[in-house]
Image: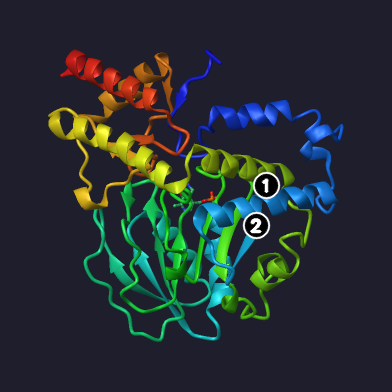
Amino acid sequence: MSSRVFNFSPGPAMLPEPVIQQMQTELLDYRGLGMSVMEMSHRGKDFVALTQRCESLLRDILAIPDEYALLYMTGGASGQYAAIPFNLLKGRTSAAYVDTGAWSRKAIAEAERYTEVHIAAKSTAQLPDAYHVRGDEAYLHYVDNETIHGVEYVHPPTETGLPLIADMSSNLLSKPLDVSSFDMFYAGTQKNLGIAGLTLVVIRRDCLGFAHPLTPSIMNYQVMADSHSLYNTAPTFPWYALACSAEWVAREGGLAEMDRRAKWRSAALYRYIDQSDFYRNDVCKAARSRMNVVFTLPDPQLEQIFVAEAAKVGLVNLKGHRSVGGIRASLYNSMPEEAIEALLTFMQAFEDKYQ
Ligand code: PMP
């Protein structure tokens, strides 16, 4: 596969090569059935067997206790920003939200359409050092990894005592978790979990059944749990890609190994940035993301040249998010060590040339 580049896209993102190869091998004839996964009924026994295999893999990898249900939904994490207040306000009139960046604020803006939002903490380029809640809010929502700003939690903010809900869109399956800390967490599948089109929701079963009566059925967690997420025609191929990705994570050594690799990759990059006068990362060290390393150059024009020259040597999608500019290297589970070595070599040469 010599034509493949190192793709630093924030998502949809690079997939592990063995995952793509498996999908290619099985594409025309899925396990002797004479058809691809894309052509199978979502309610047929073969697809249902696939979903069961997927679920037992995810339960093993994430150590998810039986008291938690897994839901496979559509609408992305953005859909969950609405589904959460619909399902989890439980008759209360407010919810608490942490604001650590752009995705936090999207979640807040959506929740404000349905309930009163209390901002428990707000911080930029660092994690909050205190949380202020009244105590009667329905839950505390936070974003475990801010994909645009490169800010990541090390430990979930459990100290408020409120039921905890986490957006883990950009770091789920990259580190071990204590599932019991959460009432619910969720992620779109287009980063560490496969391809775009599916959203994984992990929710404690005693949180089901509280949906507001006007909740659309497709967003109702109880409806989704009761139907094994087959309430409507499920996105079968993304579900298959999730199963293949989960299998790959398990084969590679599970979440401890994913975490080790993520720390190695990001530490190598931060170390280089910190010793340089040319590149700069302003995120407080304790909050630096292992998944999305953001940095700036001395001027925005140089950043454009950096992105263009990097692409010429097969290092693509390094442009920062349009709202913040700069450079962003997204380093999900699939990113090999050689990509970091290639990026560092390029960064050194670029610095020597333009400094
Ligand atoms: N939350 C986070 C942390 C994200 O990174 C993203 C997507 N980049 C979203 C939410 C939105 O996800 P979706 O596009 O799947 O709705």
- For the point 41% across and 42% down, which residue is it? 257
Residue at 81% x, 30% y: name it.
Answer: 29
Q: Tag 1: Cα neighbours inside 10 Å, few (<14), some, or many (≥20)?
A: many
Horizontal arrangement in the rendering, residue 194 relative to residue 258 (left or right): right
Look at the picture and state if 301 lies above or below 119: above
Point out which mark residue 72 bears: 2
Q: Quadrant of the C terminus?
A: top left
Three-letter residue code for mark 1 = Trp
Residue located at (64% from left, 45% from top): 243
Query: Residue 128: horizontal and vertical position, in percent?
Result: 25, 64
Residue labelled with disc 1: 239
- The answer to whether residue 144 shows anywhere in this view is yes
**Of the pair 82 and 227, the residue shown nearer to us:** 227
Q: Earlier in the sequence, mark 1 or mark 2?
A: 2
Dots 1 and 2: beta carbons under 8 Å?
yes
Percent position of residue 242, x then y: 62, 45
User: How many other residues sit within 10 Å of disc 2, few (<14), some (14-19) or many (≥20)?
Assistant: many
Q: Give the answer, above or below, for where 138 lies relative to 192.
A: below
Q: Amino acid at mark 2?
A: Tyr
How far apart are the alpha carbons under marks 1 and 2? 8 Å
> What colour-coding does the image apply?
rainbow
Please state the horizontal and vertical placement of residue 39, each as a whole percent of the image.
Answer: 83, 39
Quadrant of residue 35 within the rendered picture = top right
